């Protein structure tokens, strides 16, 4: 794991603005009548280092029902909560807790409750906040939640839960039969936030964008895969028989918006339960000197009853991006399984001793 102090400069300045709660330009951070810079080839310049760090959840919690935006009071209370000293930067479910005191309890890390090694390595000079006053990143359906699963998806998820229960419910006695029963993150294969679609990582959230005439390169800091190289020359997707962890991406410009379509997933990342029929359409639009509007639409007729869309701003950062090293899959998977075998031997020896003593 590679961590960095002060790695999340985010939307505090915008969040504290009096116009933060209004819709339109203030909601997206868009600068009115602003013209994006151009590359030498005349395309909008998306290059640089960006972050999507946020406490805003992907799906709207039941607490907010059909409320699309926080009120001024709710936004102020939430921003104060998540930016106070001692906040756990990887705290979850902050939005769904109705009791203010319980929200604070769930958010603060103490000496007895330091959550991983966050107290040292994830303390931020400029703390992570909210991406906007929206109550969810999902903007369509209007409920702010993913559409219902199809019957095929329900069957598929039930089978996965049956065969890999520890991956779904975090049971106290997970399976250590072999490397294939360990999680993909533990094996350093892929993180779900890598995408596409790219979603906010809990930490190490920087990404870098490069552009040439024929390619766009997206390089995420916390990634187990190579940088995503997106051809822009109109070539077709790979043959359907070729399936990849991050899928196969192809890009084009629609006016000043970069549109990236990704297909040919191998179906093993299980993004929100998706199948290998997943199709992701991402849109990147530079809307201010320090901001890209990033949106993605998910289509998978084998998983959801309709497509759904989410959005989040990418905010420019002056922080550095460091090499990410996932040591767990390189070394610790062997240690994890070795320890499991030793524990099994100890248990067998103890059982044999008890049998002999009878």
Image: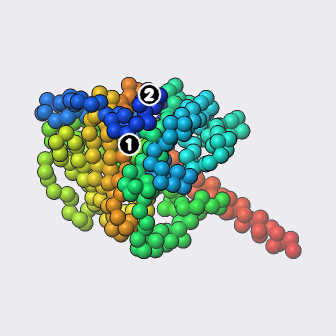
* 23 vs 320: above or below: below
Quadrant into which the C terminus falls: bottom right
The local secondary structure at tag 2 comes to loop
The residue that mark 1 highlights is 312
Percent of width and height locating residue 129: 49, 35
Query: Residue 120 falls in which quadrant of the image?
Result: top right
Percent of width and height locating residue 212: 18, 36
Asked whether the viewer can see residue 206, the reply is: no
Asked whether the viewer can see residue 160, the reply is: yes
Q: Residue furthest right?
A: 358
Q: CA distance from mark 1 to mark 2?
A: 18 Å
Instruction: Give the colour scheme shown.
Output: rainbow
* 136 vs 131: above or below: below
* 319 sits to left or right of 75: left
In this rendering, which labeled residue sits more in front, label 1 or label 2? 2
Q: Determine the residue positioned at 57% across, 32% down.
A: 80
Pick whichever, 310 or 321, lies toward us: 310
* 155 sits to left or right of 232: right
Label at residue 8: none
Pick whichever, 67 or 154, lies toward us: 67
Q: Determine the residue positioned at 29% across, 30% down.
A: 31
Pick whichever, 86 or 2, lies toward us: 86
Q: Determine the residue positioned at 16% across, 35% down.
A: 43
Which badge, 1 or 2, comes first in the chain's sequence?
A: 2
Percent of width and height locating residue 228: 29, 45
Percent of width and height locating residue 180: 49, 62
Q: Determine the residue positioned at 62% across, 32% down.
A: 86
The residue that mark 2 highlights is 17
The local secondary structure at tag 1 comes to strand
* 202 sits to left or right of 38: right
């Amino acid at each position: 794991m590679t961590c960095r102090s002060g790695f999340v400069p985010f939307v505090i300045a915008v969040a504290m603005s009096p116009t933060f709660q209004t819709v339109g330009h203030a909601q997206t951070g868009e600068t009115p009548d602003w013209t994006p810079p151009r590359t030498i080839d005349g395309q909008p310049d998306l290059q640089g280092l960006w972050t999507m760090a946020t406490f805003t959840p992907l799906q709207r919690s039941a607490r907010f029902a059909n409320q699309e935006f926080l009120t001024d009071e709710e936004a102020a209370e939430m921003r104060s909560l998540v930016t106070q000293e001692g906040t756990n930067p990887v705290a979850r479910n902050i939005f769904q807790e109705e009791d203010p005191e319980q929200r604070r309890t769930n958010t603060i890390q103490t000496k007895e409750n330091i959550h991983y090694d966050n107290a040292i390595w994830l303390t931020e000079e400029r703390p992570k906040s909210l991406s906007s006053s929206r109550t969810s990143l999902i903007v369509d359906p209007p409920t702010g939640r993913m559409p219902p699963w199809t019957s095929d998806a329900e069957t598929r998820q039930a089978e996965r839960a049956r065969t890999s229960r520890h991956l779904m419910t975090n049971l106290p006695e997970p399976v250590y039969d072999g490397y294939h029963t360990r999680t993909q993150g533990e094996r350093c294969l892929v993180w779900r936030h890598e995408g596409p679609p790219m979603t906010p990582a809990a930490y190490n959230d920087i990404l870098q964008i490069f552009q040439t005439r024929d390619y766009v390169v997206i390089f995420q800091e916390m990634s187990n895969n190579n940088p995503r190289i997106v051809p822009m020359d109109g070539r077709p997707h790979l043959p359907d028989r070729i399936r990849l962890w991050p899928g196969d991406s192809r890009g084009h410009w629609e006016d000043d918006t970069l549109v990236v379509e990704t297909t040919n997933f191998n179906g093993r990342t299980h993004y929100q339960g998706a199948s290998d029929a997943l199709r992701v359409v991402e849109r990147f639009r530079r809307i201010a000197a320090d901001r890209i509007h990033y949106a993605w639409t998910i289509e998978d007729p084998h998983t959801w009853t309709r497509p759904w869309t989410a959005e989040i701003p990418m905010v420019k950062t002056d922080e550095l991006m460091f090499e990410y090293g996932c040591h767990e899959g390189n070394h610790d998977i062997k240690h994890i399984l070795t320890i499991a075998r030793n524990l099994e031997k100890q248990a067998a020896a103890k059982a044999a001793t008890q049998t002999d003593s009878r």
